[in-house]
Image (cartoon, helix red, strand yellow):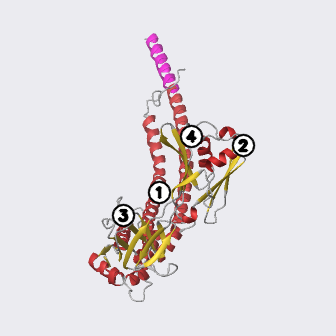
Amino acid sequence: MASISTLGVGSGLDLSSILDSLTAAEKSTLTPISTQQSSYTAKLSAYGTLKSALVAFQTANTALNKADLFTATTTTSSADAFSATTTGNAIAGKYNISVTQLAQAQTLTTLNAQSDTKTAIASSDSSITIQQGGGKDPVKIDISAANSSLSGIRDAINKADAGVSASIINVGNGQYRLSITSKDTGVDNAMSISVSGDSALQNFMGYNPASATNGMEESVTAQNAKLTVNNVAIENSSNTISDALEDITLTLNDVTTGNQTLTISKDTSKAESAINDWVNAYNSLQDTFASLTKYTAVDAGTDSQDTSNGALLGDSTLRTIQTQLKGMLTNSGSATLKTLSQIGITSDASTGKLSVDSTKLENALTTNSAGVKDMIVGDGKTSGITTSMSTNLTSWLSSTGIIQAATDGVSKTLNNLTQQYNAASDRIDTMVARYKAQFTQLDVMMNSLNSTSSYLTQQFDTSSSSKS
């Protein structure tokens, strides 16, 4: 008997449609699970969006949570001969500065020239000892006889990290000299050089400032910087002077013609910029909150919610963060300033967003920068708006924080839903396979019965015809 390849061919029944209908009916039971999976997947993504928004705000909050923003100063010099930088604690004022001498590093150059840079000077192995003042340890450099050319000595000194640099000078007419320069300026960093092991090398490059006979000469003299600040004489081994004026570092570039003026002024621009960036970041965070909790009203009597609703609508984790952040806006550490509105920052009751009155903020920073600092930064531990927010943001975003806990909860639910879906899908596939097998058997049986019926009918017809 021929096999039945298509359901219903043998029986004449529409078994394929019946099987499709049964399959669709069974698979419809998966829809509620799929719907839940979509909802929790959207929630998982929403927690990622929330975390990213909080990290962005945390960056702006950290930038504002610095006390020296509110004591920042700017410097102005009346001459290019010097410049200055300040720390946050520098006191505003004016200083008369006169620079009469720059610090410079000592350079020693050999008196005798060599006709090339490759010929060995020493006939035996030796060592060069370079001693700089200022309490530095001497540096000993071994020189083999074969490596005692100008190039060999230069390279050995530069590799030794001896606090000096060596170079070869072409003085013309095929003549070369060795030059050694201290890396640090000032009299205290002047050098002496001694050679042991070979007298020719000692005579060539030995140098002792107390000796009358030396192989090298001081081509550049070590000297200290000399200046006066408000007519007080100052001498320093460096052209960068950080210990003359409290919280002010001077950089000397040249000598001056008489007294020049350095002006230290209060700078509110850094604090203003940080506050505006913080407000913008806070408002962006509020936009994220609004997007994730969006609600669209539906007609009364409709069970389903609008598909455009935010994935975290009614979410307790987001609501907790949003409520606590708003409460921290009043955690002032100042005795004189209690509300942000006093420095020009106000809140919109309907959106939760902040706005800045630039004029009022600048005036507050100019007239009471200490109070603004106390309000915003506080003691850096428990009081102050940004300090309180910093502590909580760190907690929320930690690996054990509420966002991670919520994310883990959603992930666990999704895993359970996946297991439920797979189990139900496997059950349906098994059931459909059983239906198909039964329908196939029915089709075969009906086909067989139909064939038998046709045969018998044919036999009856033949018999009747013969009798006639």
Of marks 2 and 1, which one's residue comes earlier in the chain? 1
Type of secondary structure dominating the magenta stretch: helix
Q: Is mark 3 on a helix, strand or loop?
A: helix
The numbered dot on residue 114 is 4
- In screen coordinates, is 296 left or right of 22? left
The numbered dot on residue 36 is 1
The residue under label 2 is which amino acid type? Asp
Q: What element carries label 4?
A: loop
Mark 2–mark 1 distance (CA, rounded to whole Å): 85 Å
Disc nearest the viewer among 4 and 1: 4
Disc nearest the viewer among 2 and 3: 2
Of marks 1 and 3, which one's residue comes earlier in the chain? 1
Q: Give the range drawn in magenta.
A: 448-467
**139 up-or-down from 319: above or below:** above
Q: Are marks 4 and 1 in contact (CB under 8 Å)?
A: no
Residue 228 picture quarter: bottom left
Of marks 4 and 3, which one's residue comes earlier in the chain? 4
Q: Are marks 2 and 3 in contact (CB under 8 Å)?
A: no
Question: Residue at 30% across / 78% down in the picture?
Answer: 362
- Location of the N terminus by quadrant is top right
